[in-house]
Amino acid sequence: MAQSFPWPVTDDELVLSNALDDVVAAHSEAGPLEEAWLREAAANLILEAYHQGVRDQGVLAHYALKTLKRGRPGL
């Protein structure tokens, strides 16, 4: 069962969850511990973009993937 995150209770909840699934799918080679870290880091990044006004699933996922690829400090 996938771990859930405290998304805002809005119509965009499915968009947030699907964006997170897209990021995890892009890193399908991750082991269980890496996936747990990836889910948490990606969820935080997705929420960051959401709070900045981004509502598109693809853009949310792309933002998280791009930021993770850069190796953002503190994550």
Image: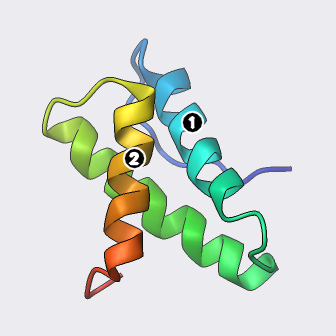
Q: Residues within 10 Å of mark 1 (few under 14, many from 20)?
A: some
Marks 1 and 2, Cα distance to the nearest angstrom?
Answer: 14 Å
Residue lying farthest to the top in this orientation:
11
Q: Which residue is mark 1?
A: 17
Is residue 35 shown above or below 62? below
The answer to which of 1 and 20 lies nearer the viewer is 20
Q: What colour scheme governs how the chains and residues are painted in the rendered image of this protein?
A: rainbow
Q: Nearer the viewer, mark 1 or mark 2?
A: 2
Q: Which residue is mark 2?
A: 62
Query: Residue 60: in sight, yes or no?
Result: yes
Residue lying farthest to the left in this orientation:
52
Labels 1 and 2 touching (C-beta < 8 A): no
Left or right of 54, for residue 37: right
Q: Residue at x 24, y 51 (%)?
A: 48
Q: Residue at x 74, y 76 (%)?
A: 30
Task: Classify mark 2: helix, strand or loop.
Answer: helix
Q: Quadrant of residue 50?
A: top left
Q: Name the amino acid type tagged 2.
A: His
Left or right of 28, for residue 41: left
Circle nearer the N terminus (1, 2): 1
